[in-house]
Amino acid sequence: MNKYVVKDIPVESRFSGDLYLDTGFILTTSELPFSQELKNMLLEMDFREVFSIGALNPITPEPAGVIADAGKMQAAEDLFVNTEKYMKDIFTQVARNGQLDFKDIADKMQSIYPLIRENPYFLIKFQKTRHVNGDFNTFHAVTCMVISIIIGFSLKLPESNLIELGVAALLHEIGMIKLKSQSYFEAKKLNLEERKALYVHPLVGHNILKSFNFPRTVCLAALEHHERENGKGYPQKLSSDKISLYAKIISVACSYDAIISHRPYKQEEDSTTNIITLLKNENKDYNSIVVKALLHILSPYPVGLYVLLSNEKKAQVVDVHPEHLYFPTVQVLGEEATIQTAENGISITRPLNRSEVETK
């Protein structure tokens, strides 16, 4: 096999053969580009070399593909930037004039959520490159809204629920405007007074939204987004089915954002390990169905993808697992039994497009 130094591999380049971590563990197929996410993960986990029987090809994607991808990344950036400006105005309006209108924000979500539906993977890809520049509240609100809506799509929520969920995610931290919020985003321990204030901000947010006659579901999301399935959250220590659906979704979105976002107060961490810890959900902090919806979004082989197996059979991904993101459960086309792909067993050779699946 040919050996390649990870830091020297250009992002989005391709290999003419499959890429391996060692002689048995496949990282990516020849059909897929070497992504920035994969490069970061390898370097974070201290893997400095990878192997392939193929050659490293120069970055020569088809012009149409480059234009399309660049357009989607620009659309993702525009959505984040424009929505952050909008939310900054909303927070300023509430703080100065005490004005907030559900219909106005719902109308904004009506125009936003179709853009998220059309562009989920590029939105997540762009979000990972963002840094907090200015107001943290608006940055966090928009990120959580995007992730929450993507989870909502995965859960197959109807349009009316998606719009309410989006409004709830945008405003779930509105109680923070009553605090000196900057102190909560610095690399220092909170004093007793700051901790007490932090614990009551969900109640403050709930009361603000209730005073403006927001739907009860949106108010509850603000009140409960720090509650945990195991009853160890705050402010009410609710558990399981006592927590509202929107709050369950937003809590997962918040935790994912906290792991992946670049923030001025946060020390360097192993984000890949932390994401896996979140997805494994061993402490039962989060609703398992919501976590699975996020997992299906983040997997390199998401549920529904058609793939070619190492035994030359065609299959469809039916489940993914936090511990083994590159080895999902698949169902061979035309067969009832499922197969757990594995490093030393049947594995995925490459994804298939629909024309290859439909070919008899």
Image: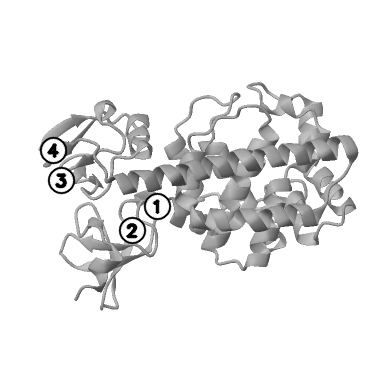
As measured in the structure, the alpha-carbon distance from the residue carrying label 2 to the one carrying label 4 is: 27 Å
As measured in the structure, the alpha-carbon distance from the residue carrying label 1 to the one carrying label 4 is: 26 Å
Q: Are marks 2 and 4 in contact (CB under 8 Å)?
A: no
Is 341 left or right of 257, judged from the image as shown? left
Is 259 left or right of 102, judged from the image as shown? left
* 3 or 4: tag closer to the N-terminus: 3
Callout 4: SS: loop
* 1 or 4: tag closer to the N-terminus: 4
Q: Are marks 2 and 1 in contact (CB under 8 Å)?
A: yes
Residue 329: percent from left, percent from top = 33, 63
Q: Is residue 25 above or below residue 337?
A: above
As measured in the structure, the alpha-carbon distance from the residue carrying label 2 to the one carrying label 1 is: 9 Å
Report if residue 160 is visible in the image.
yes
Question: Which of the two discs, 1 and 3, sits closer to the camera?
Answer: 3
* 2 or 4: tag closer to the N-terminus: 4
Residue at 25%, 26% (x, y): give it: 8
* 1 or 3: tag closer to the N-terminus: 3
Amino acid beneath label 3: Gly
Disc 1 target residue: 299
Q: Are marks 1 and 4 in contact (CB under 8 Å)?
A: no
Q: Is residue 249 above or below residue 58?
A: below
Disc 2 target residue: 328
As measured in the structure, the alpha-carbon distance from the residue carrying label 1 to the one carrying label 3 is: 22 Å
Residue 221: percent from left, percent from top = 73, 54
Q: Do the residues labelled 3 and 4 touch (CB within 8 Å)?
A: yes
- What crowding class fits label 1: few (fewer than 14 Cα within 10 Å), some (14-19), or many (20 or more)? some
Disc 3 target residue: 17
Res 55 label: 4
Amino acid beneath label 4: Ala
